[in-house]
Image (cartoon, rainbow, N blue to C red):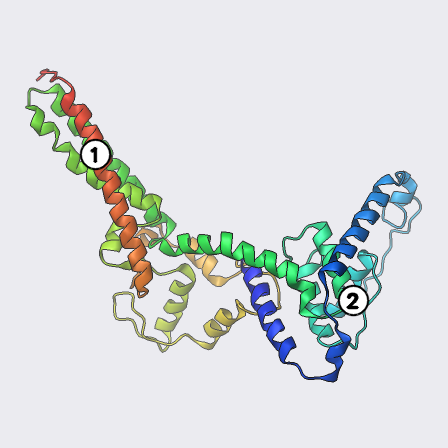
Amino acid sequence: MSKNLQFFLWYRDYVRRFANAKTPDISLAPEWTQAMEDEAVMRIKKEQAEKARRPPQGAAEIFKGTDFEKGADTTRESVTVTVTSKSQASQAFASAGLKAPFTIQPFRRELDRVIATYIMDGAPRQLNLTDQEQKTVLHALSFTTHPSVLRSIANGVEATLRQQAHPNFIRWSIRNGNPPRITFAAGLGAAVVLFGVVAALVLTLSSAGRGYRALAAIAWVVGFTIWMAAYKGMCVVLHGRHHRHIRPWDLFASDSDDDGNGHDDGNGHDDGHHDDDSIRAAKSAFDSFGSGNSYEDEPWVVGYRKRNILRKIFDREVWIEEPALRQIQDTIFVQSVLLAVVCAGVLTGVFVAVPAGRFF
């Protein structure tokens, strides 16, 4: 989802810069109206329908010009090609059956980079566009550089950010522990619940009074609270201190600070400054143009994978500074306790109602 946010931030900035531009060539970029877009969509649909009615090509025509062509020379020369965003944009326009646009339009070079980064097939941050949406926006970009050419895509991206990315980010932010810690907490909660069930069974089969069976409710309340909070991504122990685990990328960044000029107070609070590489890495996450957003090659990925499982479970912690986030976590904790009380009440009622076994 990061590519959607990067594109949306660039688009909002582009709209502002285009509106504030006072150069005479702005008149060369007229607005792309809804009527123009509807006409382009109808033209694309017509072309697709005509292409579907064409007879299939023979095998010889399909493989013509490829390595599979009969008698083709397999020797090739190694040629170094410098691919620029302008050439990539021209290739995208050609694949859509469009002519190259006017290069004297304002911001044309920047929009070429947008095409090469977000629009064309195989782009490093290619947006999730249908074939029709891709061709429609290329038709618009071949006509003008007005921000309205990307309005429909920006609206779709904004809807995705609001309806999917933002709720997912909230759920991710609520998690106060890393996956091993949450798994450990869920397992601990299930074990406590199971212990309560075993204790209730033993008391039910014994000659002890019915009132003693209700003692298992203590284990059920505690166990269900831990398990339900873990289901929401929370560890109740960390929540009790309003702490969270340090994210893996911040963990290794702070480790490098400790080795340098940073200082650690022993409780996971780092009062040093990140080095220049860390600052540049943080800023690059919001760069509008660049390579893909894959983090698999980051140094912290390898380092975190090699980390011992016990170190992951009992990793370094920091204080949760955001009051709204603490309030959300408090609400989840209260909900977990209430649900745990209900579940414990049901189980207690069942075991208390069962007649005593009096086996011992």
Q: Estimate the x, y position of residue 270 in percent, counting from the top left.
A: 32, 71
C-beta proximity under 8 Å, tags 2 and 1: no
Query: What's the distance in space between the residues labelled 2 and 1, CA to CA?
Result: 67 Å
Answer whether residue 125 is visible to the viewer in this image.
no
Height in image: 100 above or below 198? below
Residue at point 26% right, 49% down? 333
Q: Nearer the viewer, mark 2 or mark 1?
A: 2
The disc, 2 or 1, on the residue closer to the chain's N-terminal end is 2
Q: Estimate the x, y position of residue 114 in percent, counting from the top left.
A: 67, 66
Q: Estimate the x, y position of residue 33 in percent, counting from the top left.
A: 72, 63
Q: Quadrant of residue 230?
A: top left
Residue at point 7% right, 28% down? 211
Instruction: Check disc 1 and report its element: helix, strand or loop.
Output: helix
Give the amino acid at mark 1: Ala
From the viewer's perspective, is 290 left or right of 72? left
Answer whether residue 108 is visible to the viewer in this image.
yes
Residue at point 81% right, 72% down? 102
Residue highlighted by disc 2: 143
Q: Quadrant of residue 24?
A: bottom right
The label on residue 130 is none
Instruction: Check disc 2 and report its element: helix, strand or loop.
Output: helix
From the viewer's perspective, is 131 left or right of 312? right
The label on residue 344 is 1
From the viewer's perspective, is 42 left or right of 272? right
Height in image: 193 above or below 23? above
Q: Estimate the x, y position of residue 320 in percent, counting from the top left.
A: 30, 63
Q: How many marks overall?
A: 2
Nearest the viewer among 71 and 296 is: 296
Furthest residue in direction front, as rendered: 35
Give the amino acid at mark 2: Phe
Residue at point 63% right, 53% down? 128
Label 1 CA crowd tier, 10 Å (few <14, some 14–19, many 20+): many
